[in-house]
Amino acid sequence: MICGVDEAGRGPVLGPLVIAAVAAVDDRALRELHVKDSKQLTKKKRAELAPLISACARVETLVISAAEIDAYRLNGSLNDLEAAGFATLIQRLQPAQAYVDAADVKAERFAEVIRQQLDFKLDLVAAHKADATFPIVSAASVVAKNLRDELIEAIAAEFGEPIGSGYPGDAVTRNFIERWLRRHGTFPPHTRTSWKTAQEIASQIKITKLTDWE
């Protein structure tokens, strides 16, 4: 059995990190679905493909909340957290061979961190842009991104207002966090408070408040 692992939501300031693993005897069925790197597909297409992938392969997912990310980063790196998540899913699936999208600039170092957390041996290949190279990783990319899309929609429904994509460059996301901070004095739930973007927004609000007293 071969396995592909990828993530969605590594960089956002709002929302979870989602890791997905897809395993199958081979990737022929996935090739027939014309899976691609999730970033090359529309949200609608990802939603269409996700159940089709689950129908022809075994799928495992892991959701890591913003609070868990903040807590982990007190003593560890995001790369290490991601590697641990990848290892968790590979351990569940026990494939003979696994392909993973490397988070570290040194792909083999990322692979070695994963290997150290497994209790069985396998052929593990870590590569940059693996989601655009190996169909089994492309499938994992689609599953991870689709699940994160669904979770972001659920968070927006929880707040009862648009929150954007959660990424730092999204003006809707930044404006939502700023409004919430001004209204409540704290970051909204699901915010990665350790992120530079979150701290910049908080600092700007403090400066604005001080200016109001001048």
Image (tube, rainbow, N blue to C red):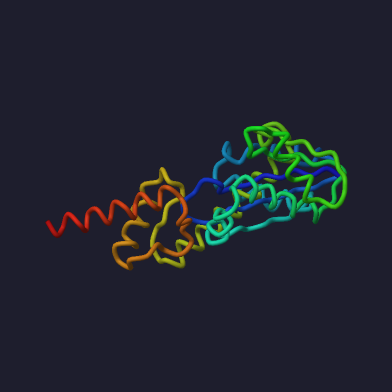
> Furthest residue to the front?
75
Q: Position of residue 98 (x, y in %)?
A: 79, 42
Q: State whether residue 62 is above or below residue 113.
A: below
Q: Pick whichever, 112 or 192, lies toward us.
A: 112
> Furthest residue to the left?
214
Q: Pick whichever, 160 or 188, lies toward us.
A: 188
Q: Quadrant of residue 101?
A: top right
Q: Is residue 179 left or right of residue 197?
A: left
Q: Is residue 32 left or right of residue 150?
A: right
Q: Position of residue 204 (x, y in %)?
A: 29, 51
What number of labels is visible?
A: 0
Q: Position of residue 159 (x, y in %)?
A: 42, 66
Image quarter in which the N terminus is found: top right
Q: Is residue 17 left or right of residue 115?
A: left
Q: Residue at x 75, y 50 (%)?
A: 87
Q: Position of residue 208 (x, y in %)?
A: 22, 54
Q: State whether residue 115 is above or below residue 17.
A: above
Image quarter in which the C terminus is found: bottom left
Q: Residue at x 85, y 51 (%)?
A: 94
Q: Is residue 42 left or right of residue 88?
A: left
